[in-house]
Image (tube, grey):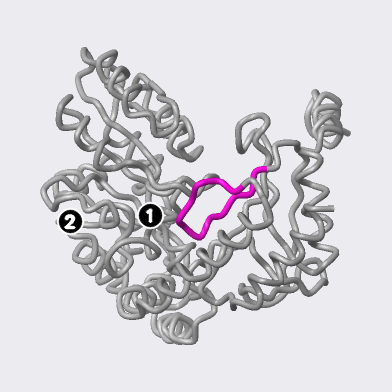
Amino acid sequence: MASLPWSKQLAENLAERKAVGRYRQQRTRLGAQGVEVVVDGKPLLSFCSNDYLGLANHPDLKKAFIDAAEQEGVGAGAAHLLTGHSHYHQQLEEELADFMGHEKALLFSSGYQANLGVIDGLMVRGDAIIQDKLNHASLLDGARLSEADLLRYPHADISRLHKRLHTASAAKHKLIVTDGVFSMDGDVAPLAEIIAEAKQHKAAVFVDDAHGLGVLGEQGRGSVSHCNIKQDERPIIMGTFGKAFGTAGAFVAADEEVIDTLIQQAHTYVYTTAQPAAIAAATLASLKLVQDENWRREKLQALIAQFRAGAKGLGLNLMDSSTPIQPVLVRDDKKAIAIGKSLEEKGILVGVIRPPTVPEGSARLRITLSANHSEQQVQQLLDALEVICTD
């Protein structure tokens, strides 16, 4: 018996996705995350993880995790507001607040939950949320959940942001929401200009810095540091640990009133079990490495420069990015899939991104670099792209 009365329609929709090259499938990795992985039983050189600093399998993180699990057990066993908030969680929140230059920080179990919690926890019907059109799906979902008016402006278009703020002039509260580094394009938001608009229109700013934290700015403090935003103008910031930090979960850093309000009103914080204390312990170890080992960011920038120079030399349609996210624009969905398959046949794995994740006509190879890659491995990728893309 079908699980849904409309299962036949679902099957037709899935078949249509397959026909146009937009069908997604899980793949199984064996062993630790890294630049050399085994996926579906096949050894591959990977350029499609978010482990930007190469910390996901670092021995310091593993030791901290194991030691904390021995002390605290595995499951947190309760929400943060009951008995799930361990001394590791508390220490991590305090150190993150200091690291980010904010009064307080609050842990969430994922970046998606953090974004939903912040927007729905702070904004209500009668307020206005103004978002970049290329923002992450979780930011858009948070706006819909809040029931505030949602206005969107073309990507990084400050003049259109200005007009949207004028349109929202009657709103009780206004919140500008943007990615710090855009996950599919790899470019950095014009935060100084956004914050200037916010000041002019008495709006607040919320930055999702999932892909900037650890990679950009002084000691890896992210996009806000990279853009030289003054201490007294810093926006609310969300950062994740599952990318450059190599662990899991997320946090929000802001002033005391914002964080205390989220503790009262953010459903994705209040009504969920805390992450294991061992993850917080591992993230504390990661935070130290992120701050102390600047060589990881220096090496990453050298690899980015190497790849961009090589890709331009091949005449590839490289998007404008100075971050580890290096998209090569292909446009045609099926052609992008074919290039991805050809690379895999040569032992190289890259992300193949198609609509609806990106706009129509902008299918791409999403190549991501890690500090654990070598110059030889980047050259191996470039050599393969030369053979496949210039035939």
- Viewer-proximal residue, 302 or 59? 302
Q: Amino acid at mark 1?
A: Phe
Q: Callout 1: 10 Å neighbours few (<14), some, many (20+)?
A: many
Residue 102, numbered circle: 2
Can you see residue 142?
A: yes
Is-magenta flag for residue 321?
A: yes
- Viewer-proximal residue, 390 or 269? 390
- State the extent of the magenta-drawn residues as a range: 318-329
The residue lying furthest to the front in this view is 313
Residue 191 location in percent, x, y?
Answer: 29, 42
Tell me the SS state at disc 1. Answer: strand
Above or below 386: residue 135: above
Report the residue marked by disc 1: 108
Residue 154 location in percent, x, y?
Answer: 44, 26
Tell me the SS state at disc 2. Answer: loop
Q: Amino acid at mark 2?
A: His
